[in-house]
Amino acid sequence: MAKYILQRLVYMFITLFVIATATFFLMQLLPGSPFNELGGKMTEAQEQILLEEYGLNDPVPVQYAKYMLGMVQGDLGVSFQYDNRSVTDIILDRIGPSAHLGAQALIIGSILGIILGMIAAIRHNTWVDYSSNVLAVIGISIPSFVFAGLLQYYFAVQWRIFPPSFWEGPIYTVLPTISLLIFPMAICARFMRTEMLEVLGSDYIELARAKGVSNSSIMFKHALRNALIPVITVLGPITVSLMTGTLVIEQIFAVPGIGEQFVRSISVNDYPVIMGTTMLFSVLFILVILIVDLLYGMIDPRIRITGGKD
Amino acid sequence: MDNGTKKYNAEKFERVHLPDDANEELSRPQLSFWKDAWIRLCKNTGAITGLIVIVFIILMAFIGPFMNDYTNEGANYDAAYLPPKVKGLEAIGFDGMQTYEVQGATEEEAIERGLAGYEIEEEYVQDTEVVITKEESEDGYVTVAMEVDIYAARGLEDQYFWFGTDSMGRDLWTRIWSGTQISLYIGFLAAMIDMVIGVIYGGISGYYGGRTDNIMQRIIEILSGIPNLVVVILMIILLKPGLIAITIALTITGWIGMARIVRGQVLKLKGQEFILAARTLGANDKRILMKHLIPNVTGMIIINTMFTIPSAIFFEAFLSFIGLGLQPPIASLGTLIDTAFDDYRVFPYMLLYPAVIISLLMIGFNILADGLRDALDPKMRK
């Protein structure tokens, strides 16, 4: 186990290194300088001073070394857009609303999904099952921004139940959270239903029934527990969907989160912020995948983790 | 002894003579795997509905733009922001009436301001209704909903824009269907490329095993740690945003899932007897791979591809939505939804139609993919 974890950690660092390097060199190849926006208003000399100031005149390898060295120390550089604010600072400043939304959507979404999937499996091949299936397909299919648009139009513009945008209190989180939680809910419901059906068809459930165990006890003590384990694996796709989701949902509802910042940084070539956020997303993603794999192996002893895949 | 046995005793029966080989005959016509899968698919109402929806949208994507005389390009600001109007469907809402919400200190002032603000003559106002009275509102203004025959107000009574027009007066019907073409193109192209790379990569890795497999799998391990979103966004920033950039970006990491599945299947299959038999008969690697292994994995490949298509369509729409996708004047469903967001509070139809079409397309592909999975792989049916 220790060897496995160590091996995974090594891969994790290689991946992060590859991402950081790729990000850095891609940014170098980008057309335009961060000071394009001010084009014309700045003299050549002023631009040179700015480029010098931010170290953009250094040879590329020097910039690269500086960047990597800083990253190891948790320093992601300085934003071009906001006067000398460090990227780490900006990210810390903005991660609150995103984390809040993400956690809310993840928790509510997966609980709802698990309940939905369980009910569908218990009432297999009835209208309950069919409608929960339809709901799951719709949830997986409809893009989050379409859903967010509809929610905003009806609940905020037409019926004025919830505020349409901004971030000033719990009530402001309702619509963005609902838009974000649809996908986790749908994917959990689907997975849960499949697993539950499989467990319900297994021999040990048959045995429990034969022994005369009550139906609710079978469902909750035997079936639910075993069916829940593989559901952990959907955390990977859910993380991806939450990251994608924050980019658009925060735009639509004007949430001052990391996704909104990211999109804005792209449009103004604020390289350090783009690179920093990219690294953050990557670390998050890799950590989730690692946690899923480790948890899965720990909870379900049937899955033997060995060094290699073959 | 009961009555039954007495009634039917052995003497009453006569042996029917059967030719000797009749026992060997199959009672049902022999079905190939694909015919069998097709029959299973046809029994699945959901999957067939999905297929019909997809076929309908594909047909419309190619026929739609030619169904009226409007073109995708060129601005006509007289015709900007016209709501949907269809000849014969006026009664069910396609009447070209636009409702504006205007505010003022009194009802009259609100209407007056509305007329001035939207440059509309009073005679074209069909109906006005107070939505929020002065007492109800927080800021002391009256909000009035004003229904205007906007086609008449602009002097375009004889025009029919079925899905309305956008901010530049372009016909949304034409734009939406040509946008659908682009979404479909992205979906199919991404699926094709990732299918080719994924299948070959996975096939080679699984079949040759050993060091080749080891190296190829380590590469996948590193690549799969990189979130798709990050790669795509970096690629799009590097290349000029557009169709090619999206296609390339989608194929950089899209094939990993496919490669893993194919490798797993090939690993499982290559130890089986029929491969040994083929090798004993002198088949070379290429023949074994192409004629024996890949055909046996085809089901899995088709299923996985069918799930790739909707995710590629979603990704294009998502990228266009955050401004990294196609650039105007080219329309895709994503860019149409993105531009619609600017004014959808007043002109909701601009958001509604592209949103409905992309949702139908995604739902269609997803349920068809589910159905195909059930039909092609009965073991996975759950």
Image (cartoon, grey):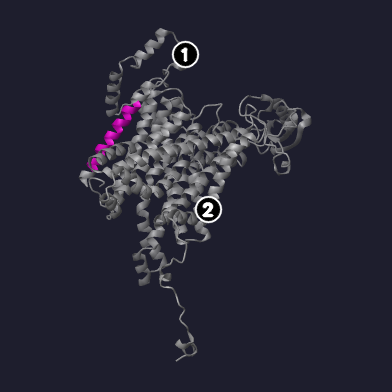
Point out which mark residue B46 bears.
2
> Badge 2: how crowded within 10 Å, few (<14), some, or many (20+)?
some
Furthest-bottom residue in this view: B1
Residue flagged by tag 2: what amino acid is it? Gly
Of residues A51 and B261, the one nearer the viewer is B261
The reply to whether residue B345 is visible in this rendering is: no
Q: Is residue B192 magenta?
A: no
Which one is in front, A176 or B282?
Answer: B282
Horizontal relation, residue A298 to residue A124: left or right: left
Label 1 sits on a secondary structure element that is: loop
State the residue position of label 1.
Answer: A39
Q: Amino acid at mark 1?
A: Gly
Outermost residue, front direction? B19
What is the secondary structure assignment of the residue under circle 2?
A: helix
Q: Which residues are magenta?
A: A5-23
For the stretch drawn in magenta, the main secondary structure is helix
Q: Name the chain letter of the residue that bears numbered label 1.
A: A
Identified at 29% across, 47% down, the residue is B283
